[in-house]
Image (cartoon, rainbow, N blue to C red):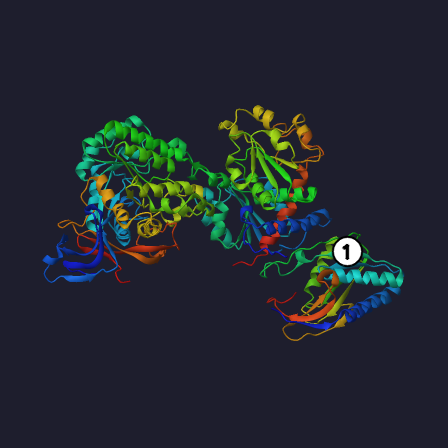
């Protein structure tokens, strides 16, 4: 049965039906081809205005979105907190309304507060694409993860996928979990007990506080970046201790199936959550994730821009 | 509505738990007092058949925002909202700007109340100077100025030694303590209940332990000193258990619950609507049911709204940054009738007592009954009227309610203060 | 609920396609060498191209190359309709430069789809020539585009459109007239 995209915004994978997620992945397949040919451009978003509103700064995600927008022939404006009047005390809503008044068709937004994009999307007519909101969600990252898994493994349903690291503070983990559950994967989360809450068991996720359990039988292992602020805040004693018990390295990699796929949203803390050799090795798909990120974002921009404004 | 001095409310179901009355009878009003209907010459007759006639309801927890934040609410608009909600009296919290920590501010409030309030306003004074939790405020002077209780609401004294002194001192002036129980460290930067939903949504949570710990502190102090400490807005099931056990042991602890804590839960936060953000936060379904059980078995003797007006500008921001608080005066009776009376958890008499006898006992005041000679403060309720909440029609200056668009069964039909109708929808 | 009236059965449709194949063979036989490739426009230009390839191979021994092209990314009405069409597969396994290509589609109407296809093709390279083959030319042109080979010309009634069905995509062959259900002009 054919599914059509009818949403004005992309805020969270929690909101989407499995069919809608599959539609995005299928659309992304075709956009990947655009980036592989000589003329890496299509006129799909020609004449559309996209504002990259990164209230919380980012380099990688912003560059990826910017390139996706350019390949779709859109007109782009980049705004950050410091380059906007948020600095002068203007409210977020007023800033967004000003952007809307410039006839922005789409706003790609990142913010450090969970739900900021939901709030803005409800109050302006431009389409809002969530590029990360606090620890709540990062839907395009999860979509590119799903795309990568599907491409390499041929399916998602029934796969054993483990996500390792600071789940508590991770928007990537939350979006991955929703996307994987909706498409029928078996999800395991693992890491220090201070950073991996058991509450996720209530939605059908397996929770472990040791790496070996998470590795055995996994088809895919996704390692999250550990942030030094968490160590300073007392969630774990030291980076060494984290690396020793929860980092994927040559010694404990023996518990991983040889055809298990290693993923990481980047940037990698080499030899902390992931050994250099494994990051660059044959099981790693980390760079492909970046390439796929471009295709997935082109698909999302295309689908969301195609929605009639209400 | 009548401007007449003398009238009879005829044929209503009079529910007066203070006197153990629940029967159809007439109530006479003359010169602002309750009188024997037979003794009135040529009275006007107001038919209130099928309506409930109760002693005037008092809301023990209201933020009037005046002095200081009159964009959100004033004594005038706040009391009009109270009247529309069926309340004849409200207890005003002291976290105004400047805070009510001196006789001067209380005098300001009393004067504005005389000039502009349409219902009775009972002021409270701060426990500590400027609500800083460091030095005791002039509680004796505040008593002289007319406060009915002391509170640091909005904040909670973290230093137990200081709290102990405040309780001892207030006891000597006969002033009950109304405490907003919260451990500042456990609350931290939390914006919603710490539980399954805060984990799934990636938001910082306020643990129930924060409330529980300070309730335990208060129970110990009430026991040690032998004085009345009233726990405001109880929200967690562990809190209800602590209070239940303390009361069984005869400790002078009382508690109130809000209409929103008995009707809403933390999963609503996934809408990221700041009209669901308040402190203490909406908690889990088990907590909600425990609070309802506390009301049913008499552990919690008061329902109070914690009516906290905020302008739309203040609330239309990122969830993390929005101020805590929602209004509640104009939705309290509909929500509570729907959730407690129509769900057969409370009898009508018990329901009425949560707004009358309950508050009167804690404050040591003699309102809350329709005995002859008492001031004619009367709340008339239509328990069956369908009410779809339309915030744009509120008398309050603010609109920050989570109930907009929701349907309830039952609402206030009329509110009478000192014999005068301050709100009348009888027959509509 | 649209009404569906059959205009041609599978035999008549096959005859029309055969006619197109013959016309193509006739033109390209006159050139120095018989060399062209088919690009089938998604969705129903694809089975049409495959039928033509089968017939031409059988008649001449030359098997043209086959590509498929989805034009959704090149449409001029993105954001104007209630929903976006689903993007189907694009696969062009040959070098477009200096290649003679025959675009195929089921129905030629406004000409906008063909315009989009021409844009798409030029993103892949510089073909030596482009011809257009359709099963049905139904008139109603909005752009100055013509079909070089048309199986048949049918002008439907006011408010109706032409639907060409293939066994591969719809279960059986046939040409139908159905109610016009899409409110925006162009296809």
Instruction: Reply above or below: B202 against B333.
Output: above
| Residue B118 visible in the picture | no
Q: How many marks?
A: 1
Residue sitting at the far bottom: C157
Question: Label 1 neighbourhood size at 10 Å, few (<14), some (14-19), many (20+)?
Answer: many
Chain of residue at mark 1:
C
Q: Which residue: 23% across, 38% down?
A: B149
- Residue B43 in picture, x, y percent from top left: 13, 61
- Residue B110 in picture, x, y percent from top left: 20, 44
| Residue A212 visible in the picture | yes
- Residue B144 in picture, x, y percent from top left: 17, 37
Q: Is residue C81 left or right of residue B378?
A: right
Q: Nearer the viewer, residue B393 or B297?
A: B297
Q: Nearer the viewer, residue B238 or B124?
A: B238
Q: Is residue A173 left or right of residue B176?
A: right
Q: Which residue: 54% across, 54% down?
A: A8
Q: Is residue C66 left or right of residue A306?
A: right
Quadrant in which the N terminus of chain B is drawn: bottom left
- Residue A74 in picture, x, y percent from top left: 61, 52
Image quadrant in which you'd find residue A246:
top right
Image quadrant in which you'd find residue A172:
top right
Instruction: Reply above or below: B363 against C39.
Output: above
Q: Secondary structure at mark 1?
A: strand
Quadrant in which the C terminus of chain B is drawn: bottom left
Q: Is residue B426 left or right of residue C111?
A: left
Residue at image mark 1: C67
């Amino acid at each position: 049965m054919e599914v059509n995209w009818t949403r004005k915004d992309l805020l969270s994978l929690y909101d989407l039906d499995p069919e809608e997620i599959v539609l995005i992945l299928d659309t992304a397949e075709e956009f990947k081809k655009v980036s592989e040919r000589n003329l890496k451009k299509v006129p799909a978003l020609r004449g559309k205005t996209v504002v990259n509103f990164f209230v919380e700064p980012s380099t990688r995600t912003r560059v990826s979105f910017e390139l996706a927008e350019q390949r779709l022939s859109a007109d782009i404006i980049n705004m950050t907190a410091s380059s906007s009047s948020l600095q002068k005390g203007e409210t977020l809503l007023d800033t967004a309304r000003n952007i809307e008044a410039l006839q922005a068709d789409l706003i790609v937004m990142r913010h450090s507060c969970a739900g900021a994009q939901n709030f803005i999307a409800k109050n302006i007519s431009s389409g809002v694409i969530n590029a990360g909101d606090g620890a709540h969600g990062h839907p395009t990252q999860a979509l590119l993860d799903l795309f990568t898994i599907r491409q390499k493994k041929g399916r998602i349903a029934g796969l054993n996928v483990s996500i390792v690291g600071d789940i508590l503070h991770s928007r990537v983990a939350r979006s991955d979990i929703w996307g994987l559950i909706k498409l029928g994967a078996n999800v395991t989360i693992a890491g220090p007990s201070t950073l991996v809450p058991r509450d996720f068991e209530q939605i059908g996720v397996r929770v472990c506080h040791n790496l070996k359990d998470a590795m055995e039988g996994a088809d895919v292992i996704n390692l999250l970046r550990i942030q030094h602020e968490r160590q300073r805040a007392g969630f774990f004693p030291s980076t060494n201790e984290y690396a020793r018990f929860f980092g994927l390295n040559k010694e404990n990699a023996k518990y991983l199936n040889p055809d298990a796929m290693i993923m990481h949203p980047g940037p990698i803390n080499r030899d902390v959550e992931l050994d250099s050799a494994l990051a660059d090795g044959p099981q790693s798909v980390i760079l492909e994730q970046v390439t796929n990120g471009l295709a997935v974002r082109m698909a999302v921009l295309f689908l969301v821009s195609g929605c009639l404004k209400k | 509505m009548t401007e007449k001095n003398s009238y009879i409310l005829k044929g209503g179901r009079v529910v007066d738990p203070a006197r153990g009355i629940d029967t159809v009878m007439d109530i006479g009003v003359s010169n602002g007092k309750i009188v024997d209907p037979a003794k009135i010459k040529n009275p006007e007759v107001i038919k209130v058949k099928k309506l409930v006639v109760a002693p005037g309801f008092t809301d023990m927890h209201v933020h009037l925002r005046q002095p200081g934040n009159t964009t959100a609410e004033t004594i005038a608009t706040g009391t009009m909202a109270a009247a529309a909600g069926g309340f004849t009296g409200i207890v005003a919290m002291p976290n105004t700007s400047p805070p009510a920590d001196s006789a001067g501010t209380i005098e300001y409030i009393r004067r504005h109340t005389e000039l502009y309030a349409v219902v009775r306003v009972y002021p409270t004074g701060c426990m500590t100077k400027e609500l800083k939790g460091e030095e005791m405020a002039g509680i004796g002077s505040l008593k002289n100025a007319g406060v009915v209780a002391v509170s640091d609401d909005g904040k909670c004294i973290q230093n137990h030694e200081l709290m102990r002194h405040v309780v001892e001192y207030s006891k000597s002036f006969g002033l009950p303590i109304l405490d907003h129980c919260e451990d500042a460290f456990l609350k931290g930067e939390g914006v919603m209940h710490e539980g399954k939903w805060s984990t799934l949504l990636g938001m910082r949570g306020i643990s129930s332990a924060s409330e529980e710990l300070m309730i335990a502190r208060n129970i110990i102090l009430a026991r040690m000193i032998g004085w009345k400490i009233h726990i405001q807005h109880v929200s967690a099931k562990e809190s209800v258990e602590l209070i239940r056990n303390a009361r069984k042991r005869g400790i002078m602890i009382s508690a109130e619950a809000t209409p929103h804590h008995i009707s809403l839960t933390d999963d609503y936060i996934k809408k990221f609507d700041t009209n669901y953000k308040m402190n203490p936060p909406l908690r889990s379904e088990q907590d909600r049911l425990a609070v309802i059980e506390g009301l049913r078995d008499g552990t919690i003797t008061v329902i109070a709204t914690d009516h906290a007006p905020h302008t739309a500008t203040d609330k239309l921001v990122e969830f993390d940054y929005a101020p805590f608080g929602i209004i509640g005066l104009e939705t309290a009776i509909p929500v509570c009738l729907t959730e407690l009376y129509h769900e057969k958890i409370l009898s009508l008499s018990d329901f009425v007592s949560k707004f009358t006898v309950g508050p009167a006992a804690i404050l040591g005041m003699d309102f809350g009954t329709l005995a002859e000679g008492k001031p004619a403060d009367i709340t008339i309720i239509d328990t069956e009227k369908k009410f779809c909440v339309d915030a744009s029609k509120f008398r309050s200056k603010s609109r920050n309610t989570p109930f907009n668009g929701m349907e309830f069964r039952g609402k206030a039909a009329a509110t009478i203060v000192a014999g005068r109708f301050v709100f009348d929808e009888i027959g509509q | 609920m649209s009404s569906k009236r059959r205009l041609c059965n599978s035999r008549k449709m096959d005859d029309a396609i055969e006619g197109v194949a013959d016309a193509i063979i006739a033109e390209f036989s006159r050139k120095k060498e018989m060399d062209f490739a088919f690009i089938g426009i998604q969705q129903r230009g694809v089975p049409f191209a495959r039928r033509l390839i089968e017939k031409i191979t059988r008649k001449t021994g030359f098997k043209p190359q086959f590509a498929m092209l989805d034009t959704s990314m090149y449409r001029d009405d993105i954001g104007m309709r209630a929903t976006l069409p689903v993007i189907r597969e694009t696969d062009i396994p040959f070098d477009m430069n200096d290649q003679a290509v025959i675009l195929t589609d089921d129905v030629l109407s406004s000409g906008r789809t063909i315009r989009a296809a021409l844009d798409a093709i030029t993103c892949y390279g510089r073909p030596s020539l482009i011809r257009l083959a359709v099963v049905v030319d139904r008139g109603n042109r909005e752009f100055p585009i013509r079909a070089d080979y048309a199986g048949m010309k049918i002008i439907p009634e006011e408010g109706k459109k032409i639907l060409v069905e293939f066994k591969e995509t719809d279960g059986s062959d046939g040409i139908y007239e159905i109610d016009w259900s899409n409110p925006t002009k162009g296809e």
